């Protein structure tokens, strides 16, 4: 590098660059050490802080090595290349490890964070009713514990924003039970009606209202996972499984203006070959989230029944499970019993 060539001829220049690099490292280390980083009500474990310190130390040594490496040639006249040692250093900073995600999910309440950075027509209602919020938070924490530690961090769901309701203007459907916002690492969840649900726990088609609240969590999480893996890019393998000539875009509302799927119409019925429900035919993202919610949610038994009869659904379930196992390849930490058991059971049924 030109920098290395200059430093070999000028000790003062070397000291100047060395001090600059050291100041950057020292200041960053100070910020990481002193800042109170919190996830919900728990502090980030000390090992996470130490891991960040180690990564900054590696980066510091890497930059210092570049500054101290003499080069006779002007690098501007030669093609850019990275040697093996440099590649290893960069790999250490970027490698996909469990330690990268070993932190708590942050649960936020009374917090008005505009969905999609305020660039959409969604907004949140924070006027919680009665004991809805308190009761829902207890329920939510139980559901989050079903996933391996760090799973939601990697899935770009490090923040759960619990609101009274998620509202959508200029739409037939003005209220949403949940909303995925992976661009901000957020999932929005609504507490609307939760206390009444606990009190009466009404059922419809053998599905309880609590099942509905669970479904929302799993469904929205799978939207964030889909984004983490693809960033909204085309899922060619999935689309190739659809029936010939099929195109997403089925209406979400019937001829009477009623939603095709609502809390009053839950369930997987396989109404169209290759799809678990009508909602899945509306667009790919919703179908992916529906399959994911089926694997981990209360509709698992129905999903397994469908995949044993419908070869297209069978192939989609297999593809989903293969992808999720690649997404989270880390060894068991004794906190993934639910997650692993659900995956193994569906995988066996849809072999």
Image (tube, rainbow, N blue to C red):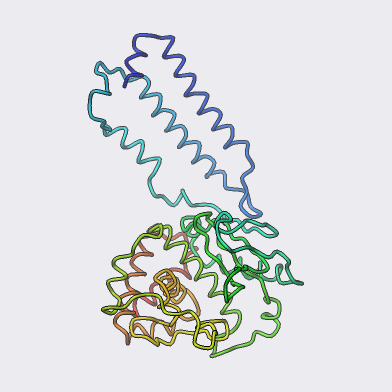
Q: Position of residue 337 (x, y in %)?
A: 47, 68
Number of marks in the rendered image: 0
Q: Position of residue 300 (x, y in %)?
A: 45, 80
Which residue is at the far bottom? 205
Name the residue: 54% across, 41% down.
49
Residue placed most toward the observer, 223 or 249: 249
Q: Position of residue 178 (x, y in %)?
A: 57, 69
134 to the left or right of 284: right
Name the residue: 54% across, 69% down.
217
Which residue is at the far right? 130
In the displayed structure, 21 sits above or below 54; it is: above
Q: Position of residue 298 (x, y in %)?
A: 50, 80
In the displayed structure, 46 sits above or below 262; it is: above
The quadrant the N terminus occupies is: top left
88 to the left or right of 124: left
In the displayed structure, 153 sits above or below 87; it is: below
Residue placed most toward the observer, 244 or 184: 244
Name the residue: 59% across, 64% down.
122
Q: Quadrant of residue 303?
A: bottom left
32 to the left or right of 318: right
The quadrant the C terminus occupies is: bottom left
Which residue is at the far left? 78
């Amino acid at each position: 590098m030109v920098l290395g060539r200059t430093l070999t001829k000028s000790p003062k220049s070397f000291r100047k660059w060395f001090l600059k690099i050291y100041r950057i490292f020292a200041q960053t280390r100070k910020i990481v050490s002193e800042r109170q980083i919190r996830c919900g009500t728990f502090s980030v474990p000390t090992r996470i802080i130490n891991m960040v310190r180690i990564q900054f130390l590696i980066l510091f040594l890497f930059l210092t090595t570049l500054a101290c490496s003499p080069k006779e040639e002007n690098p501007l006249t030669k093609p850019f290349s990275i040697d093996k040692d440099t590649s290893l250093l960069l790999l250490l900073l970027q490698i996909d490890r469990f330690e990268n995600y070993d932190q708590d999910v942050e649960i936020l309440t009374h917090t008005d964070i505009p969905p999609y950075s305020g660039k959409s027509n969604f907004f949140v209602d924070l006027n919680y009713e009665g004991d809805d919020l308190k009761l829902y938070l207890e329920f939510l924490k139980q559901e989050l514990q079903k996933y391996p530690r760090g799973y939601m961090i990697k899935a770009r769901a490090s923040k759960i924003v619990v609101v009274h309701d998620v509202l959508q203007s200029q739409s037939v459907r003005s209220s949403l039970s949940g909303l995925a916002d992976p661009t901000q690492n957020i999932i929005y969840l609504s507490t609307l009606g939760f206390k009444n649900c606990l009190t009466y726990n009404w059922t419809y088609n053998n599905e309880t209202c609590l099942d509905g609240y669970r479904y929302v969590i799993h469904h929205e999480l799978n939207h964030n996972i889909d984004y983490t893996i693809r960033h909204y890019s085309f899922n060619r393998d999935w689309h190739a499984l659809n029936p010939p000539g099929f195109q997403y875009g089925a209406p979400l509302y019937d001829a009477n203006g009623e939603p095709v799927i609502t809390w009053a119409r839950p369930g997987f019925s396989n109404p169209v070959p290759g799809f678990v429900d009508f909602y899945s035919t509306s667009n790919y993202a919703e179908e992916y989230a529906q399959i994911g919610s089926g694997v981990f949610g209360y509709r698992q038994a129905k999903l397994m029944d469908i995949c044993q009869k419908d070869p297209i659904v069978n192939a989609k379930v297999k593809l989903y499970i293969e992808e999720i196992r690649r997404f989270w390849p880390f060894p068991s930490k004794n906190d993934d019993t639910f997650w692993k058991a659900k995956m193994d059971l569906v995988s066996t049924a849809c072999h």
